[in-house]
Image (cartoon, grey):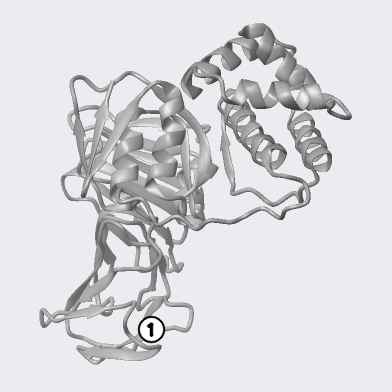
Amino acid sequence: MKKDLQRVVQLLESASLSESDKQFLINYLNDPQSDELKISLYLDFLENAEQEQLSNPEFSERLLEKIHAEIGTERKKAPVFRLNWKWTAAAVLLGILGIIAVQLLQPKPVPPIVKLEPAAPNEVPAPTISKAYITLSTGENLVIDSSKSGQLAIDANVQITKNNDGSIAYSGSSTAVTFNTLTNPRGSKPVSIILNDGTKVWLNTASSLTYPTAFTGTTREVSIIGEAYFEVSKNEAHPFKVKLGEKGTVTVLGTHFNINRYDDEQFTAVTLLEGSVRYETSPQQSVQLSPGQQANFNNGAAISVDKNVNIEAVMAWKNGLFYFNQADLGNVMRQIARWYDMDLEFKGAIPKRRFGGEMQRDLKLNEVLKLLETNKVKFKIEGKQITVFP
């Protein structure tokens, strides 16, 4: 079987395919052994292959171009999906074999018949709209996505407006101290808001931001649950503070930073992109961060600082991506459950798996889980629940 895999790779590299070569590829694809076994064998083969060739992105591009040229199909741009090179190689192999089989099994003179299959009952699409809403000081809820652009409401003499790009903006002055809450539930695209002082905030799914309609005191204070990215309007006379409940306070003057503070995650993470912030969990414990650093806090433990954090991974959610940086399965599945508005159940102990790489957040749930299954873990979707099997 391993020799067959070696021959497959050699054929895919070759400049042309003979009829016997094509038949070999078709026979290989129809082999009764499962795709999982093929992937396992292929990964084992790649482990011993020449890394500079098989793990080289340029090699992969040349390989794909040759295949499409040989079978006479137009190269289409594939969705962004970059995991570690071994995952990608296995997925590409199976995908290419499927393309070859479909093309070669079609009679040449007859155009291919396209059959539209109904969506599978367990297909869960990625969020396409924002379900965010604002709770006013009166208790009234304003649903953002269904509201037209323009003025949405006036709360304590402050105007609330929906911009053409879907963001929310507060403007005007007031001496009254009133609070609003922006809630972005599970299964909702991120939403952005411009506070009364000009500070911009992006709110991730399953998150909420509570803030005054206008800042009236010596400090500008807001609180969050979940995850948010801030671009704070600079005002040295009025420091900006983000309250994290029992997990501390972040104090800034004017800066760009991200806070991840989900109740179902073990750590609270404060990541600084620009400027300077101080993260304080108690009067006896605080840290000052510089750009590119991340503070992590676990209840009952000291704050730790990562001085070389992966900013691309931290900001992936705002850029429409999942980015797993050696994340454990529990963390990966909690991110997925929040995004697709699903509940989680683990059968037995959580498998000890680590995931690295990135993929688009607009994939269907079953597509995401199929990719994760290449790392020897199984899933089942029933209604609003994902069950994870070791």
x and y percent of residue 240 in the render? 34, 62
For the residue labelled by badge 1, is the local secondary structure a helix, a strand or a loop?
A: strand
> Quick one: label 1, few (<14), some, or many (20+) residues within 10 Å?
many
x and y percent of residue 192 in the render? 40, 68
Q: Is residue 112 left or right of residue 304?
A: right
Q: Which residue is at 75% across, 37% downward?
A: 64
What is the three-letter code of the residue carrying label 1? Lys
Q: Quadrant of residue 45?
A: top right
Q: Which residue is at 69% across, 24% downward?
A: 25
Quadrant (top left, top right, bottom left, bottom right) of the C terminus: top left
Q: How many marks?
A: 1
For the view shown, which residue lies furthest in the left direction?
A: 139
Asked if residue 17 is positioned above or below residue 1 in the image, the reply reads: below
x and y percent of residue 255 in the render? 47, 58
Quadrant (top left, top right, bottom left, bottom right) of the N terminus: top right
Q: Is residue 71 left or right of residue 151?
A: right
Asked if residue 247 is positioned above or below residue 206 in the image, the reply reads: above
Q: Quadrant of residue 84?
A: top right
Q: Which residue is at 73% across, 20% downward?
A: 9
Q: Is residue 94 left or right of residue 293?
A: right
For the view shown, which residue lies furthest in the right direction?
A: 15
Q: Which residue is at 66% across, 27% downward?
A: 26
Q: Quadrant of residue 111?
A: bottom right
Residue bearing the label numbered 1 = 162
Q: Nearer the viewer, residue 9 or 351?
A: 9
